[in-house]
Amino acid sequence: MTIVPEILTLIIPTYTRTEFLTRILRYYWEKGFPHQIFIADSSSEPVRAANQEVVASMRDILNIRYEPYLPDISFPAKIANSLNTLESKYVAFCADDDFLIPKGLEACLQYLEDHPDYSAAQGRRLIFKIIQNSALTRGWSFKIVNAERGQNLSQDRAIDRLYQHLSDYASTFYAVHRRIELLRNLKMAGDRTRDLRFGELLPSCLTVIQGKVNRLDVPYTLSEAHQENTNRKIVNWGDLLVGDDFSDRYTAFRDCLVREIVERTGEYEATAKEAVNKAALAYFGMVYGMYRVPNYNEVIQWLPFIEIATLASQFSSYASSQILLRRHTYVYRSEISTVKQHVLRHVKT
């Protein structure tokens, strides 16, 4: 089956980072990217004007649509609005400091076309850093530093997929999605969550409930780790878990998933509720291991402390992550090399 360009839109949200927007658009320019690119820009002036100049300079080659938003718009609202203005069957998101590899994107797009029982598909994600060399050697180096884990969620029962998803969590946000379903999920998340943690987790879980999710063995995303994105002011799970209103936040999250399971699958409500709590137990066990939340067992009574500690230990396998890192760095060396050359050409000196 031949995929026509109009079937997919790549959405790039951006905010006050002209240098990253320029870098990613030039990458797609050089790759001859055939699909529509939607720039969702909530920058203020004068950055917005600079971004508009960058977009205008590439319109002759790339199919770009630019949409400005108010600087104070929330991220979920900006994303939902972007999806609502599009008509393409599929969408994928790419952060302005990442690289979504066209080869992997096409593979995921074709997979969804061929498998209507799948709600999303993505490939492998690698994390890189740009490191300044010593005064003797000068210049900059490009280094792959991590490989994201993640499994195929191909179980027939939605509650089984949900448990696997949350027990070894990898976000589905940057996967290729069916646009209408994703728009619905993000609107539901916007109505039922008050923070970006649950705001990301809820639509990801809804996607998994609605269909299977595949992680293809193809290069898909190269993400840069740098100071600007590690310092973003997003409340962490550790703070949420000890907050006075965590129980209310979790209940809204759980009840939304329970309703979706019941409506989509016909499971009994009690079965669905038990399944969501079990999956959440596995997820927050991982979170506990990351943040070492004090008195965590007293904060959430339905999560036994000993089981949390046991589960958390399953997600700290350094050896496993290093095996993935070495394997993906070798297998995807051609695409990595292309991104490396592009990135190093755009490093600020």
Image (spheres, rainbow, N blue to C red):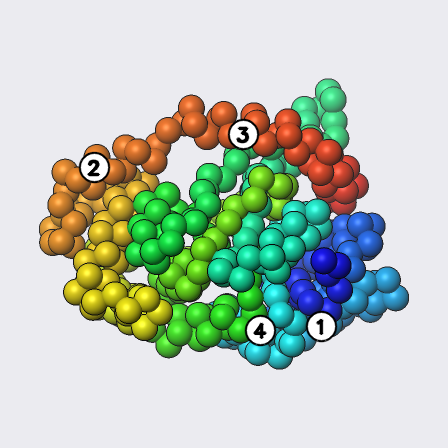
Specify which label sits upstream in the sequence, 3 or 2: 2
Per the image, the residue denoted by label 2 is 309
SS for callout 1: strand
Q: CA distance from mark 2 to mark 1?
A: 47 Å
Specify which label sits upstream in the sequence, 1 or 3: 1
Per the image, the residue denoted by label 1 is 66
Location of residue 204 in the rendering, given as x and y in whole percent from the top left corner: 42, 59
Q: Residue at x 60, y 37 (%)?
A: 128
User: Does the image show residue 72?
Assistant: no
Mark 2 surroundings within 10 Å by alpha-carbon count, few (fewer than 14), some (14 through 19), many (20 or more)? some
Q: Quadrant of residue 40?
A: bottom right
SS for callout 4: helix
Q: Depth check: 243 or 214 in front?
A: 214
Image mark for residue 325:
3
User: Does the image show residue 191?
Assistant: yes
Badge 4 vs badge 2, beta-carbon distance below 8 Å? no
Location of residue 237 in the rendering, given as x and y in whole percent from the top left corner: 32, 53
Q: Residue at x 35, y 32 (%)?
A: 316
Q: CA distance from mark 3 to mark 2?
A: 26 Å
Per the image, the residue denoted by label 4 is 83
Q: CA distance from mark 4 to mark 1?
A: 13 Å
Tell me the kind of residue under disc 4.
Leu
Specify which label sits upstream in the sequence, 2 or 1: 1
Specify which label sits upstream in the sequence, 4 or 2: 4
